[in-house]
């Protein structure tokens, strides 16, 4: 029971940091990642908060994953429900400042990406399921028999196009995120000596 409680705390810290990192990229005002650009555009189009857009899209993605037969973990569900809520709390209370100078904004974005990397380590290391969008990548790869890399790129491109059409924030920061987030996550994993391939995820219905 103690281990479960500690894992929940670790997850929640990870998801809070994930929200902090996302809001830092938003406040840098340089352009968002493909998925966040989509959430941003959706929030503007139907007059909801960006956090609510993130939660709504996450629920739809998890539902699609389940239809395709992908197992869902408690960490996956908490990912969907908490990151968006944390984002709204942080943004509503103006916890993270904005800066005017371009160099400060770039630094803010890079720091935000590193925080996202740390958050990714924290929640994946618990082993209660990956994020819903990673699950979608795996589900579609199995369904249409195409390489995971191609599927991932196609999903990201589709999210980016939809985000742009809906008026989401797309700019140089979008390309910084696309190019840098992978290497940054790898650096963080190396710092913590974390091998994601050795994690055995436990899903809903399995003993935690």
Image (tube, grey):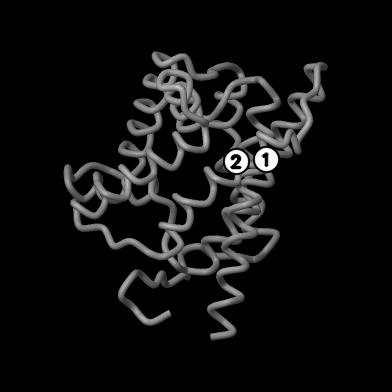
Question: Considering depth in this image, is 44 or 69 the residue closer to the camera?
Answer: 44
Label 1 SS: helix
Label 2 SS: helix
1 and 2 marks in contact (CB < 8 Å): yes
**Image spot of residue 185 (x, y percent):** 60, 48
**Image spot of residue 155 (x, y percent):** 34, 33
**Image spot of residue 82 (x, y percent):** 52, 51
Residue drawn 52% across and 31% down?
49
Total label count? 2
Q: In this view, does 192 lie to the left or right of 81?
A: right
124 in relation to 62, above or below = below
Give the Cα separation between the discs numbered 1 and 2: 5 Å
Q: Name the residue under label 1.
A: 90
Q: Quadrant of residue 123?
A: bottom right
Quadrant housing the C terminus: bottom left
* Dot label at residue 162: none
Question: Considering depth in this image, is 144 or 4 the residue closer to the camera?
Answer: 4
């Amino acid at each position: 029971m103690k281990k479960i409680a500690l894992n929940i705390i670790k997850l929640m810290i990870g998801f809070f940091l994930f929200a902090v990192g996302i809001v830092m990229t938003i406040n840098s005002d340089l352009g968002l990642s493909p998925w966040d650009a989509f959430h941003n555009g959706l929030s503007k189009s139907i007059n909801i908060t960006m956090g609510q857009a993130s939660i709504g899209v996450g629920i739809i993605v998890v539902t699609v994953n389940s239809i395709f037969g992908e197992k869902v973990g408690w960490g996956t569900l908490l990912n969907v429900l908490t990151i968006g809520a944390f984002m709204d709390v942080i943004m509503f209370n103006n916890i993270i400042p904005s800066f005017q100078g371009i160099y400060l904004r770039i630094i803010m974005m890079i720091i935000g990406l590193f925080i996202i990397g740390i958050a990714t380590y924290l929640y994946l290391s618990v082993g209660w399921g990956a994020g819903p969008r990673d699950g979608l990548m795996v589900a579609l790869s199995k369904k249409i028999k195409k390489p995971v890399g191609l599927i991932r790129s196609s999903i990201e491109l589709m999210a980016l196009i939809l985000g742009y059409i809906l008026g989401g924030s797309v700019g140089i920061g979008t390309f910084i995120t696309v190019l840098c987030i992978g290497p940054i996550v790898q650096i963080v994993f190396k710092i913590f000596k974390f091998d994601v391939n050795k994690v055995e995820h436990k899903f809903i219905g399995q003993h935690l």
